[in-house]
Image (spheres, rainbow, N blue to C red):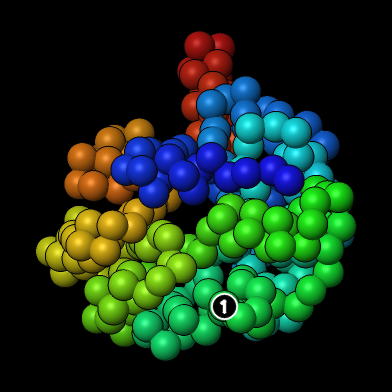
Amino acid sequence: MRANPVKKQLADGGTAFGTMIFEFLSPGLPIILQNAGSDFVFYDMEHSGFTMGEIKNQFALCRGLGLIPLVRPPDKSYETTARLLDLGAMGLLYQMVESAEEAERLVSYTRYPPHGHRGAMFGGAHDDYSTLSVPEIIDGAHERTMVCVLIETAAGLANVEEIMAVDGVDVAHLGHGDLSLSLEVPGQTDHPTMKAGIEKIVAACNASGKTAACLAGNRQIGKDWLDLGFRMVSYSYDIGLMLEALGGAIGDLKEHSS
């Protein structure tokens, strides 16, 4: 049964890098991401329209690679969590988490009894079709599954210390777009209110021994947020990467040809 080295390296104080996928799924995507240096990939199901079948195929393609497949569910229900875990997700990124009580409930969805109430099905995609004993599979699942929460509302920010103190929550992910809307400074990540909020998220993670994560839209933002204390960085996302690379190159060629 496959382990999750990203969870371990973050828990040990290290860093991890990857990207987010919203649009482009292909059989070659996971190995391309790994060859580019990614440790993990977040598949976004909240905004993309990806189906369970498409996501299961991507999880299967990640199997055997060093790339860790994580997913942003379309909702925060038990049913969706259980389905994605059984399909092979090695971690979940929950949207708009706003309280410790909510975080505790979400963690319980990812744990088998008596630590939670995840439904039992063994020898399937989620345990790599393992022939290990049930207790070994359960231990492996608990050890490798990451619970990541998006802090992207004023309420979530106000309660971030309590949220990150919850046992089983591994990562606080800055949701800079929604957080800026909630704090009424839309899109202004350099606004003092946003800067204070970002620093509060990092401080809460440091105080609880957890990891602060972010999506960096460009290299300089990534460097700045690493310097601030973020240790899990998604560099851009598939649409942005294509627009950046193709748009820049075509612009240069058009200028050269004129």
Q: Total number of numbered labels?
A: 1
The amino acid pointed to by label 1 is His
Direction from residue 188 to residue 41 in the image, left or right: right
Residue corresponding to mark 1: 115
Direction from residue 169 to residue 5 in the image, left or right: right
Q: Position of residue 208 (x, y in %)?
A: 26, 63
Residue at image coords 33%, 58%: 210
> Which residue occupies the foreground of this view, 215 or 211?
211
- Residue 192, located in which quarter of the rendered image? bottom left
Direction from residue 38 to residue 178 in the image, left or right: left
Direction from residue 209 to residue 15 in the image, left or right: right
Residue at image coords 21%, 40%: 227
User: What secondary structure is found at the residue carrying circle 1?
Assistant: loop
- Residue 165, located in which quarter of the rendered image? bottom left
Say whether residue 139 is visible: yes
Q: Residues within 10 Å of mark 1 (few under 14, many from 20)?
A: few
The residue lying furthest to the top in this view is: 256
| 182 versus 207 height, above or below | below
Q: Position of residue 171 (x, y in %)?
A: 41, 59
Say whether residue 239 is visible: no
Q: Position of residue 163 (x, y in %)?
A: 34, 76
Residue at image coords 62%, 23%: 35
Q: Position of residue 256 (x, y in %)?
A: 50, 11
Residue at image coords 40%, 45%: 10
> Which residue occupies the foreground of this view, 171 or 27?
171
